[in-house]
Structure formats: structure tokens, C-alpha cells
Amino acid sequence: MQNIAVIGTGYVGLVSGAGISDYGHNVVCADIDKTKIEQLNKGEIPIYEPGLHELVNRNVNFNRLSFTANVDEAIRNADVIFIAVGTPEGENGASDLTAVYEVARAIGENLNGYKVVCTKSTVPIGTGEKITNIIKDVSKNINEFDYVSNPEFLREGSAVKDFLWPDRVIIGASGSRAFKTMKNVYRPLYINETPIIETTVETAELIKYASNAFLSVKISYINEIANMCDEIGADVHVVSKAMGIDGRISPKFLHPGPGYGGSCFPKDTKALISMAKEMGIDLNVVSGAVVANQLQKERMAQKLLNLFDGDIKNKTIAILGLAFKAQTDDIRESPAIEIINTLNKNGALIRAFDPAANENMKKRFNDLKTFDSWEEAVKDADGVVIMTEWNEFRGLDLLKLKGLLKSPVLLDCRNILRMDDLETMGFKYDNVGRKKR
Ligand code: UGA
């Protein structure tokens, strides 16, 4: 058992802290945000993440997990310190590392013995070296430490599962002592024979960006194929299924939709392009995926306009789903934002519903009308657009929906409804690359 401090209680920090305590270690999650820490100490989880509440409670009850606003003390008491603070998008697509460097300084000031300093936040290549130098400078080299890059691959909505049962663990470090310490942190995964890649810090840093950018490319690719399907009357689901059977391609992340969103893919693709540019390298494939993603969001808005022959003024449109994907309340870069902007610009009236993200979208669009159920949102609307693949939308009672709508017009941006049913019931509809001609 080791003493671990996780600095930053956002998605990555909180899930990692709770997950590592579940491996049997003593973990303290620290954050300068006192309100957040008070909430956590009261047993309230500040983010929406299925299974996280149970994971946190279980480990708090076993006295393996605690929360503090005293970052300095947490660092002093720890053998391993995880940096898991936010790295928002800064200027020109590069990441803003202010919070990361602040933590590095705090570690330097409180380095009271050998420690392993490990970054989980997604940071540009070369950041490990900068963090190392800050700690050395501030601590005046009095004590030893090792630096590790240990990027996280968890997805919002399935973060707990992704953390406890990862496909792989990446450990980038420069010394055997650090690898040994990290091996102990992830002991249950070593025992389970989860693939663990031991590599250099820079390689680990690049693996994270290369993975996220690849998945973004995959999504943009299938979205563009879906757009071709629209033109020729082909079914993109059959295309992606057939492609995915080929083990070299794999069926994962091959679902067409309204464009990827969230706090990672949009930011990380741009950061990778910007890093490469500084090296004199053009990432043409990733750049293409970024452009295609923006066009895909716009294409959904155009599809909606087309269903109303271009004139949506004074029409009431129900939006089902505001989060960037299901199982989260996160609306960052959500394709629903593009739809709301288009509807506002064209003089339409919006009635929206999301099972978890109503409040967050209202912070962005103050006068957005949101409702507590899909039934209320669609009542007397001239049409409906599905933006997020929540399970409750998959199982929509189409007869009831038709009865509530003023006119049966529907855009399914997630391809979750059966076209045969829509056709039998006389819906005027569209989707992403599946419409029969
Ligand atoms: C993503 C990665 O999947 C994680 O591995 C990574 O750790 C994380 O970013 C991060 O860097 O922190 P996340 O953004 O939470 O996770 O969500 P995803 O499930 O990857 O979805 C991202 C976007 O792609 C969503 O808008 C989703 O709707 C879209 N998507 C995903 C598709 O349009 N099609 C697909 O087939 C899959």
C-alpha cells in the first residue's frame, strides 16, 4: 500500500483517485477549490458520472480515500503525486498549462523526501521536462524525485469502468525506481495481465494525443462516408459493420453522427496540429478530420432546415439531447450548440430536453426553454431533432411522439430510430447516411 496524492478533482482526478484507492492504496484527492472539497467531504459528487458515487463512497468508508483543500500537506504526505488538473484550450489551439505549472511549483516547495511525480492530465510533448525543471529549481535539488507520464484514456460516461479495467496502461519514465513504484500503484492490473507499456516520458505524452487524434479521424472518416451514403441511398451502418469486421479496422468508433464534441477530441486534435506545426510538420490527416467535423455539425443544421424546405422561421423545434454524448451532463463542444445557433439565427423557437444537461446548456444560452421530459419538449412542436443517443430516446414511443407533435418531422442525428417504423407512421425524416431513396 502506498500513500498517494491526486491534485485536481475534475473528471480525471476524481475518477483516478477513487480508482487507485479501490486498488487498495491510501489516497487523498486535493484541490484548491474549497467548495468542491466541502461537497466531496459531504459525500456529494460534483460531476455526473455513472458508478462514481458508489466507488467514492465505498473507498471513503474503508478509510482509503479522503479529500482536502490543503494541497501542500497532501504533497508532503505522499509517496506518489498525480497531477490531474485541467489543461484548457489556450491561444492558437495550444493547451493552457498554468494550473499544471502551479502544481509543479507546489511540489517543489513541499518535496520533503523521494517522491514520484506523475502527470495524468493531457499535456503537450515536452511538458514533462518543463515540470521536472520547475520542481528541481523550486526544491533547490535538496531531495530526489522521478517524473512519470501516465496518460489517462477514460471516457466520460464510462470513466469508472475505463479506469478499473483499462485496455492498456502507459508509463513513461526515465528510471527503474519510478517504473517499480508505478508497477506497485497498478499492481492489480499487472496481476490481471493488462498490457502495460513502459516507455519514455515523451513517447507516453505522444501516445495520448496520437490515440485521441486517431479516434477523431476515424469518426470524421465514417461521417464523410455517411454523407456519401446520403447521396447514393446506401446504408452507412451496413458499410461500417462490414468495414469493422476486418480486424485491421475494428468496429469501434465507427458510428456516424453529428460530429464529435466534448472536452478532449476537439481540443487535443488542435493541440497536436499546433505542436506538429512548431516542428515544421503538417498533420494533413488530422487537420482534415477537424475541418470535416465542423462541416458535419453544420451539415446537421442544414439537414434540419431542408426538412422545412429552408424556411424554419417561427417554427417550433424540439431538441432531444444537449450533452455531447449520452451518460454525461457535459455540453462542451456539443453538436447541439451548432443546432441551437442555427435555429436562433433562422428565427425558430426551441423547446429542449436532456436527461442530464439542461442546466449546463442554460448557462450557455440563458433564454433556452428546457423541459423535464421529452414528452413536454415535443408538445405541439413542428418538428424534432435527436442530438444525443440517450437510451430513453432509443426507445421513443413513436406513436405517442406523433400524437404530441404538430407535424411529424424528425431528424435523427444519432441513427437510433428504426426507419421502417418512421416510414410506416408517416414521418418526414432524415438521419446520417441511412435514408432510403
Ligand atoms: C475521449 C476518449 O475516448 C478517451 O479515451 C480519452 O481518455 C478522453 O477523450 C480524454 O482525452 O480525456 P470522451 O471525450 O469522454 O473520451 O468521449 P468519447 O466516447 O470518446 O466520445 C467523443 C465524441 O465522439 C462524442 O461526441 C461522441 O458522440 C463521438 N463519437 C464517438 C462518435 O461520433 N462516433 C463514435 O463512433 C464514437
Image (cartoon, rainbow, N blue to C red):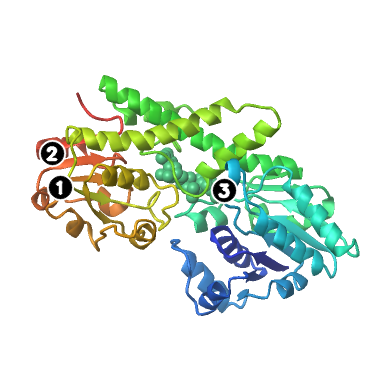
Are the residues tagged 3 and 1 within 8 Å (C-beta)? no
Q: Is residue 199 visible?
A: no
Label 1, secondary structure: give it: helix
Are the residues tagged 3 and 2 within 8 Å (C-beta)? no
Horizontally, residue 341 falls left or right of residue 138, namely: left
* Mark-to-mark CA distance, 3 and 2: 41 Å
**Foreground: disc 3 or disc 1:** 3
Are the residues tagged 1 and 2 within 8 Å (C-beta)? yes
Label 3, secondary structure: give it: loop
Q: Position of residue 386 (x, y in %)?
A: 27, 46
Q: Earlier in the sequence, mark 3 or mark 2?
A: 3
Q: Residue at x 17, y 32 (%)?
A: 309
Q: Quadrant of residue 26?
A: bottom right
Q: Residue at x 54, y 27 (%)?
A: 285
Q: Position of residue 326 (x, y in %)?
A: 37, 52
* Mark-to-mark CA distance, 1 and 2: 9 Å
User: Which quarter of the figure is the C terminus placed in?
Assistant: top left
Query: Which residue position holds label 2?
Result: 427
Query: Which residue position holds label 3?
Result: 89
Viewer-side residue, 309 vs 144: 309
Query: Which residue position holds label 1?
Result: 398
Q: Earlier in the sequence, mark 1 or mark 2?
A: 1
Q: Residues within 10 Å of mark 3 (few under 14, many from 20)?
A: some
